[in-house]
Amino acid sequence: MTSSLAGAKEARSEIKKFHVSLNQANLVPEQCYRRNHHNYPLVSYVSQIAALFFSSNYEVIPVFIKRTVAELDRNGSQPVTENYRKIVYDYLCEMTYFLKNYSPVEHETLKYHIPEDIYNAGPKKAPEIDHQTLQFKNTQE
């Protein structure tokens, strides 16, 4: 665990920006909050990661990252969820970066649950939101 207070603060700040984005009505898949909707598990796992992060219960987050990745793979053929899936992927990368560098979670635990591409991705930036219109400024790269 890296002890850089500034780096941890910056990573936390970026994660909080992701949290603002991830439940925007213009981003989440339509009807995804219905339990029988095929995107419900994906959105629920992402929300669970946020809740665990807020409560500093970091040890369980890798399990939910693994579940979220499985749902991203399962929902990969849905063009209407492309922006959401991209932001979720970047969020998982940023969360993994935080866990890897600024949390007490063992690297073996992270490597066991988190795919290599996410584990090695490094930090990611949350999309920018125009807070007056609630529209995203940069969801495509």
Image (cartoon, rainbow, N blue to C red):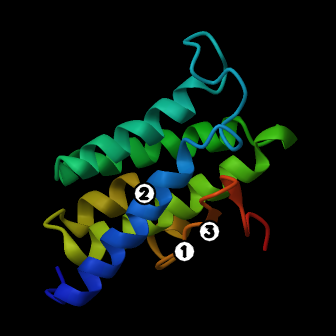
Residue type pointed to by label 3: Glu
Residue type pointed to by label 2: Ile
x and y, in percent, of residue 129 in the image: 63, 63
Sequence-wise first label, 1 or 2: 2
Nearer mark to the viewer, of 3 and 1: 3
| Helix, strand or loop at mark 3 | loop
> Circle 2 is placed at which residue position?
114
Nearer mark to the viewer, of 2 and 3: 3
Q: Is 47 left, or right, of 106 in this rendering?
A: right
| Helix, strand or loop at mark 1 | loop
Q: Is residue 128 above or below residue 32?
A: below
Q: Residues within 10 Å of mark 3 (few under 14, many from 20)?
A: some
Which mark identifies residue 128? 3
x and y, in percent, of residue 110 in the image: 31, 61
**Spatial distance from mark 1 to mark 2, Cα to Cα?**
19 Å
| Helix, strand or loop at mark 2 | loop
| Residue at horizontal 33 percent and vertical 51 percent from the top | 62
Q: Is 97 left, or right, of 41 in this rendering?
A: left
Residue type pointed to by label 1: Lys
Q: Is residue 112 above or below residue 124?
A: above
